[in-house]
Image (cartoon, rainbow, N blue to C red):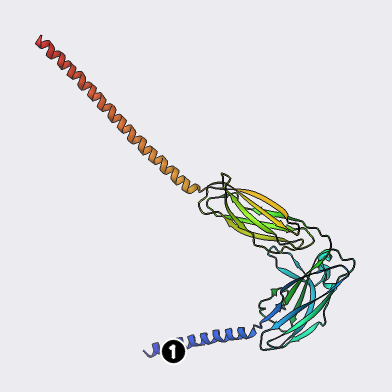
Amino acid sequence: MKKIKNILIAFAFAIVLSVSLILSTNYSHAQDILPLTVGPARQQITVNPGEQAAFSIKFYNESDSPLTGIVRVADFVVQDKDGSPRIVDDVSQGSPKFSASAWVTLPYDRMSIPSNDKVTVQASLAVPQDARPGGRYIAVYFEPSIPVPQAVGSETVGQGISPRIASLLYVRVSGPITESAIISNLFAKSFYEYGPIQINAEILNRGDYHIRPRGVLTLVDPIGSTTEQTSLKEENIFPDAARAYENKLGTKWMMGRYKITLAASYGEKGQAIERSVFVWVFPWRVATVILLSIIIVILLITGMYKRLVTKESSLEEEISKEREEIEKLKEELKKRKE
């Protein structure tokens, strides 16, 4: 009995110790999180070649401790198909066509943000006289000198070990630009047993400025009627980058050859792009069961019909024989009477 009591006490102690460790870990993690935000997360300005412009960015420290770190400006690029920006620290690795970090002047390269306060960075942008018209893409970021595990409410532009909180600046240099985009991919499996149909699409921007296409996916049934339409999510697509879209069209029960069309418009002139694919949908397992059921029913009905026909023929033969016998009896009776 005493041994069982000791085991129960040890078990209870272990539970209390585990809970204490979990609570202390959560507390320490909560202490590590320093809420840091930036506003605006994105902004867009239009400047003529040879002119200057000013813009401001506010960095907010919502923690109870001051934050000190560096302030930098760098180009950013978008290389994946999800639209995630990546800061380019080395200018030589970026595209000179869309680079403009050298045009920006910051008032200082280090700053300290008091606890529960903000710091406003007033920056200037000087566009060269010979600047090519089109888009330039810049990130102004603050990098704390101490690790910050989480940045809240900002544009998530992280690179390396040190986290960064950044404001993205879209610079439009005035002048004639090239607007060009294509539907680089529209894919759906050629055959489905059941709907809905999974559709993967990509739009590639080959122009000089980011675009925000408006697109519609349309599903047309085998008889040519539109059965469903869904809009693409409106997202920015940066130059020399593609954006991936995933959508589903249709219902579970579909049958036949369906046409899927993606039509979208983009740019200042509303240029149109379109592409289509065809998909077969046929629930062959269900159809096989139905077909076999129909065959079985037909065979049963045919067998029953044959049995009825055979039985009817037998009855007719028996009736015919009986009639012949009756006729014979009539003749015999007639002969006897004579």
The single residue placed furthest to the front in the displayed view is 269
Does residue 128 appear to the left or right of 136 in the view shown? right
Pointer 1: residues within 10 angstroms few (<14), some, or many (20+)?
Answer: few
Work out which quarter of the rendered image holds the C terminus and state it: top left
- What percent of the width, then of the height, locates residue 306? 33, 32
Q: Name the quadrant containing residue 69.
A: bottom right
The single residue placed furthest to the right in the displayed view is 129
| Label 1: element kind | helix
Q: Name the quadrant containing residue 213.
A: bottom right
- What percent of the width, then of the height, locates residue 317? 25, 24
- What percent of the width, then of the height, locates residue 113? 73, 86
Q: Amino acid at mark 1?
A: Ile
Does residue 108 appear to the left or right of 153 in the view shown? right
- What percent of the width, then of the height, locates residue 335? 12, 10
How many numbered badges does the structure rendering display?
Answer: 1
Q: Name the quadrant containing residue 308.
A: top left
Question: In the rendered image of this protein, does residue 134 appear above or below residue 193?
Answer: below
Does residue 281 appear to the left or right of 298 in the view shown? right
Question: In the rendered image of this protein, does residue 145 appear above or below residue 245?
Answer: below
Q: Residue at x 26, y 27 (%)?
A: 314
Work out which quarter of the rendered image holds the N terminus and state it: bottom left
The single residue placed furthest to the left in the displayed view is 337
Question: In the rendered image of this protein, does residue 145 appear above or below residue 246?
Answer: below
Residue identifier under label 1: 9
Q: Residue at x 83, y 76 (%)?
A: 124
The single residue placed furthest to the bottom in the displayed view is 2
Q: Nearer the viewer, residue 306 or 210?
A: 210
Q: Nearer the viewer, residue 163 or 222?
A: 222
Q: Nearer the viewer, residue 126 or 268?
A: 268
